[in-house]
């Protein structure tokens, strides 16, 4: 599945690194780039990075805060980080009232949001305040999910960076809706990432040096259309990229961000089968029944057919239903329990036959001894 047609990806690759002489833009370069892109009226400009460093070559007079839709990344920490300033969370982007429908309170919704009570948020340097409208977290959870929101308290939420690409976000009593699509949350208030192939990403990504050159030369940006979502990746040069485990191998973090933005724009969300333990139990019981009752030929046939049919069903649910269903553990449960009980039954029957054979031989020997003619003693 390809990325949404509205996504434009600009990456600071090796050629841009060479052009700039390093992995960072000066303040003037950043200012010119963002304003030149904003002139094309994109829906949002998403910067996949913290921008925590104070930019070099800051002009003596920084202009007033401009109202362009630029959003950067942030992270959360359970304790205060020394020598870092916390993100200002007073804006509307962080208020629960911005997203709740019909005067609801956050405790009245019937689903879970990922809770990080009273954690601390850190994002861009305050030097960028005039350029950046708000920040969203860019954390990829250890269970390979993403939290659309971190709930810090009853009034404060930290949205994921990709959510700034949405036209509408509503939390009603039973569902979280983004662009009028119901978002399938897990029990922990997270979403599965509908990963796109990195090959599609490589074809869509454009070196950042060309937009920078056009901005500095006063030329109009030609790659961006009105309503697009522009993703800027400042950490995409060799040796400067974060990688995460994905279904297609290790994937750059920028691919995950772009995949999430595609889900936000097109509503191509993944659902997750939440009852793993129930499925494992069912397959375990079926394995016991198969192992106890079938002959060796029937057992092998059922085992092979079960692997084929269940594997096909899992793939079909993933491809056509956008549902992630566990595969390995149910099959291990089925194969393990069926094999153990099949071997146990076979050994029991073999031992029973051996016992019958032994008893037969013993009985036969007794009868021979009993019927053996006795010699007369003269």
Image (tube, rainbow, N blue to C red):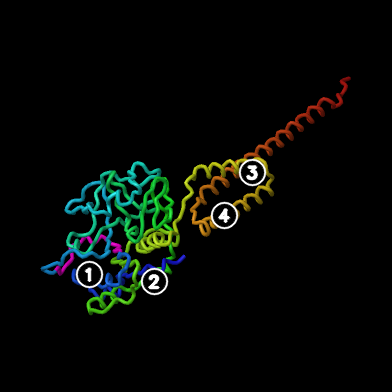
Secondary element at image label 3: helix
Q: Earlier in the sequence, mark 4 or mark 3?
A: 3
Residue farthest top in this picture: 378
Contact (Cβ within 8 Å) of mark 1 with mark 3? no
Q: Earlier in the sequence, mark 3 or mark 2?
A: 2
Q: Nearer the viewer, residue 290 or 101?
A: 101
Q: CA distance from mark 1 to mark 2?
A: 22 Å
Q: Earlier in the sequence, mark 2 or mark 4?
A: 2
Residue, disc 2? 204
Q: CA distance from mark 2 to mark 4?
A: 32 Å
Contact (Cβ within 8 Å) of mark 3 with mark 2? no
Residue 198, picture quadrant: bottom left
Say above or below: 47 vs 115: below
Q: Earlier in the sequence, mark 1 or mark 3?
A: 1
Q: What numbered label is drawn on residue 290?
A: 3
Residue, disc 1? 30
Q: Is residue 223 magenta?
A: no
**How would you rate the neighbour count of disc 2 (Cα within 10 Å): few for under 14, some for 14-19, many for 20 or more?**
some
Q: CA distance from mark 4 to mark 1?
A: 49 Å
Residue 377, picture quadrant: top right
What is the span of residues highlighted in magenta in the rendered image?
A: 46-58
Q: Position of residue 327 (x, y in %)?
A: 52, 51
Residue shown at 18% from the left, 71% from the top: 28
Say above or below: 217 vs 113: below
Q: Position of residue 269 (x, y in %)?
A: 44, 57
Residue, disc 4? 313
């Amino acid at each position: 599945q390809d990325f949404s047609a509205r996504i434009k990806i600009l990456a600071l690759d090796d050629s841009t690194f060479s052009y700039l002489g390093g992995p960072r833009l000066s303040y003037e370069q950043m200012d010119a780039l963002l304003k030149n892109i904003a002139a094309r009226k994109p829906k949002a400009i998403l910067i996949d990075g913290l921008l925590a460093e104070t930019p070099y070559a800051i002009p003596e007079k920084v202009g007033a805060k401009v109202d362009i839709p630029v959003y950067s990344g942030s992270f959360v920490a359970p304790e205060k980080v020394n020598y870092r300033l916390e993100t200002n969370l007073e804006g509307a982007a962080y208020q629960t009232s911005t997203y709740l429908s019909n005067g609801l309170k956050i405790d009245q919704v019937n689903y879970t949001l990922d809770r990080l009570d009273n954690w601390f948020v850190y994002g861009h340097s305050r030097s960028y305040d005039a350029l950046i409208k708000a920040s969203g977290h860019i954390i990829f959870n250890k269970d390979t999910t993403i939290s659309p929101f971190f709930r810090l308290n009853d009034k404060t939420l930290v949205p994921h960076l990709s959510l700034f690409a949405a036209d509408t976000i509503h939390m009603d009593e039973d569902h979280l809706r983004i662009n009028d699509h119901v978002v399938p949350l897990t029990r922990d208030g997270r979403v599965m990432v509908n990963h796109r192939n990195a090959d599609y990403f490589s074809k869509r990504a454009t070196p950042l040096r060309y937009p920078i050159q056009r901005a500095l030369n006063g030329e109009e940006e030609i790659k961006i259309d009105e309503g697009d979502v522009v993703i800027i990746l400042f950490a995409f040069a060799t040796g400067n990229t974060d990688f995460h485990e994905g279904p297609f191998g290790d994937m750059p973090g920028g691919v995950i961000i772009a995949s999430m933005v595609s889900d936000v724009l097109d509503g191509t969300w993944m659902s997750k089968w939440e009852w793993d333990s129930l499925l494992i139990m069912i397959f375990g019981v079926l394995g016991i029944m198969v192992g106890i009752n079938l002959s060796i030929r029937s057992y092998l046939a059922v085992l092979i057919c079960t692997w084929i049919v269940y594997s096909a069903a899992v793939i079909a649910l993933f491809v056509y239903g956008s549902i992630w269903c566990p595969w390995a553990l149910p099959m291990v449960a089925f194969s393990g329990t069926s094999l153990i009980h099949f071997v146990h039954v076979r050994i029991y029957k073999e031992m029973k036959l051996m016992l019958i054979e032994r008893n037969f031989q013993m009985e036969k020997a007794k009868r021979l001894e009993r019927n053996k003619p006795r010699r007369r003693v003269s």
